Amino acid sequence: MSAFEALVGLHQDRVYGLALRMTRSEADAAEITQDTFLSAYQHLKDFRGEAAFGSWVHRIAANHALMRLRHRRVAQAAESELQAPEFTERGTLADYPVTDWSRDAEEKALDAELGQAIQQAADRLPEGYREVFLLKDVDGLSYEQIAEVTGDSIPAIKSRLHRARLALREAIDLFYNRDNRGV
């Protein structure tokens, strides 16, 4: 027991500091520190010595802090859901939420149309341009990887990618200009 007390004395400030940085609450950090060393004591038989005791105890502290943060988020979400509506003296809702659903639907439709316009523009690109655009901007390959796939030089790939992006930019500009004209 005295050896464990010595380990607590050696690591408690660092565990508390970690918990404080993670939770931003002194009360939570103090509880996490206490829970951490209680868990460490209860599971001391599971400590295999593969890592240093300090690393092991820090992992326990981090897990406790993460659980505390998750619990806090769930509690806050539940609390906000359970807030009852407020009524005026006349019995009407004090702050009736006004939501303009048409705006959300309009934005979603516009996003879908824009996505379709970009897809159509990408489909109209010459094959070499479309291939480089998809490999770089969609698949995320490096220029070197694209060069291996296509067998082309990096300067040629960069040139085709630039032209593809310009063509797509033009298609997006046409889409927005069409939309602004009311067409």
Image (tube, rainbow, N blue to C red):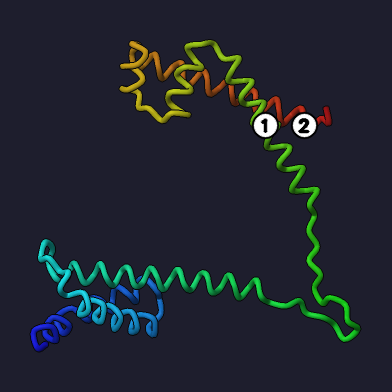
How far across and down, in percent of the image, does residue 47 sit? 15, 69
Horizontally, residue 100 falls left or right of residue 149, namely: right
At 51% from the left edge and 17% from the top edge, which residue is drawn? Answer: 130
Residue at the far bottom in the pictured view: 2
Does residue 52 sit above or below 92 in this rendering? above
Q: Neighbour class for label 2 at 10 Å: few (<14), some, many (≥20)? A: few
How far across and down, in percent of the image, does residue 170 sit? 63, 23
Residue at the far front in the pictured view: 45
Q: What residue type is labelled 2?
A: Asp
Q: What residue type is labelled 1?
A: Leu
How far across and down, in percent of the image, does residue 35 sit? 30, 80
- Give the SS element for disc 2: helix
Closest to the observer, 45 or 167: 45
Q: Indicate the quadrant where residue 77 lies.
A: bottom right
Which is more foreground, mark 1 or mark 2? Answer: 1
Horizontally, residue 178 falls left or right of residue 154, namely: right
Q: Residue 179 carries which label?
A: 2
Q: Which mark is residue 183?
A: none
Horizontally, residue 35 falls left or right of residue 43, namely: right
Query: Which of pointers 1 and 2 lies earlier in the amino acid sequence?
Result: 1
Q: Indicate the quadrant where residue 144 lies.
A: top left
Q: Neighbour class for label 1 at 10 Å: few (<14), some, many (≥20)? A: some
Q: Indicate the quadrant where residue 51 lies.
A: bottom left
Does residue 26 sit above or below 66 in this rendering? below
Spatial separation of the CA atoms under disc 1 and disc 2? 10 Å
Does residue 139 sit above or below 97 in this rendering? above
Quadrant position of the C terminus in the picture? top right
Q: Name the residue under label 1.
A: 114
At 68% from the left edge and 77% from the top edge, which residue is drawn? Answer: 83
